[in-house]
């Protein structure tokens, strides 16, 4: 199996590079942000609760997020070649929970790919996407909060994985395919896994 976390600030390219990873390595993509946006679109009770946090740029509480992830993993981990976790973990308790959940399913996390992009570029990308797609949390005020939450609550997760020797830093600025080539090199160096293609 190949289980990867794609890590980085809001707008760093996690979704963009996940699409390439799942194709290249035949992995299953779990984006917690997308899962929550689907709940919001469906009008479910969970969606209403999620919206009250996402619209402010805050994180959904750990207990709730971890139980949602547990349920998704139980449904989708079997018979897969591996998973790309996009947007999870975002806190130290989530990182600890991910290790336990993967262990419960008889597997482990192999590497964390950290996309590193300067803050001005992150803001430009999200403002542009907000104008093009209307994604609700891509407005100046919420972007400011999302970046502050990243620095205060999510950035420590990077040090957590550096300490476990699982963090692969990748320059996330530039051409999408060139960034992906660096990701592939990093995965091969860290895990010995070559792509399935
Ligand atoms: P989530 O959906 O995870 O959003 P995010 O982390 O804010 O990141 P984005 O999806 O905005 O960016 P991305 O890194 O995927 O980049 P993308 O490829 O789209 O989370 C949303 C919210 O849900 C959170 O704020 C929180 O409230 C909640 N949530 C989610 N997970 C949670 C958790 N685990 N715990 C608690 N709460 C949680 O790229 C961005 C843009 O840039 C795109 O337009 C793209 O086309 C463009 N782009 C990508 N790469 C490049 C490039 N190389 N050059 C130029 N443009 C590029
Ligand atoms: Mg995303």
Image (spheres, rainbow, N blue to C red):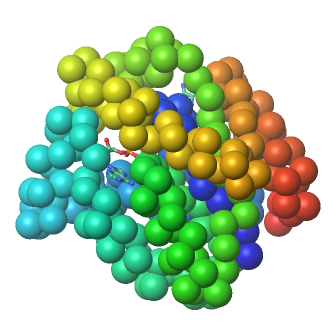
Please report the residue visible at 41 percent of the width from the left and 77 percent of the height from the top. 70
Across and down, in percent, residue 114 comes to 64, 40
As drawn, which residue projects farthest toward the front?
Answer: 163
Residue 165 lies left or right of residue 172; in this view the side is right
Q: Is residue 3 above or below residue 185?
A: below
Please report the residue visible at 80 percent of the width from the left and 39 percent of the height from the top. 181
Across and down, in percent, residue 129 comes to 37, 26
Please report the residue visible at 37 percent of the width from the left and 80 percent of the height from the top. 71
Query: In what quadrant of the picture does the C terminus appear?
Result: bottom right
Across and down, in percent, residue 86 comes to 50, 53
Q: Is residue 54 above or below residue 105?
A: above
- Residue 188 picture quarter: bottom right
Across and down, in percent, residue 61 comes to 25, 57
Query: In what quadrant of the picture does the N terminus appear?
Result: bottom right
- Taking the image as drawn, is residue 75 in sight? yes
- Taking the image as drawn, is residue 129 in sight? no
Q: How many marks?
A: 0
Please report the residue visible at 61 percent of the width from the left and 42 percent of the height from the top. 159
67 or 161, nearer to the observer: 161
Location of ligand 1 given as a quarter of the image: top left
- Residue 79 picture quarter: bottom right
Q: Is residue 126 above or below residue 72?
A: above
Q: Is residue 67 above or below residue 184?
A: below
Residue 37 lies left or right of residue 25; in this view the side is left
Residue 150 lies left or right of residue 100; in this view the side is left
């Amino acid at each position: 199996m190949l289980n990867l976390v794609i890590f980085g600030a809001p707008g760093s390219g996690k979704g963009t590079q996940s699409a390439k990873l799942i194709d290249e390595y035949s992995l299953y993509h779990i984006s917690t942000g997308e899962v929550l946006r689907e709940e919001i679109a469906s009008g479910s009770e969970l969606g209403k609760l999620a919206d009250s946090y996402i619209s402010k740029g805050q994180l959904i509480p750990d207990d709730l997020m971890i139980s949602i992830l547990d349920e998704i993993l139980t449904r989708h981990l079997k018979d897969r070649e591996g998973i790309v976790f996009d947007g999870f973990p975002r806190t130290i308790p989530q990182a600890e929970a991910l290790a336990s959940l993967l262990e419960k399913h008889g597997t482990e996390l192999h590497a964390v790919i950290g996309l590193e992009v300067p803050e001005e570029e992150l803001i430009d990308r999200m403002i542009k996407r907000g104008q093009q797609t209307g994604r609700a949390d891509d407005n100046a005020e919420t972007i400011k909060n999302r970046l502050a939450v990243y620095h205060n609550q999510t950035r420590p997760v990077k040090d957590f994985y550096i300490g476990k020797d699982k963090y692969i830093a990748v320059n996330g600025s530039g051409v999408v395919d060139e960034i992906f080539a660096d990701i592939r090199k990093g995965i091969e160096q860290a895990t010995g896994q070559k792509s399935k293609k």
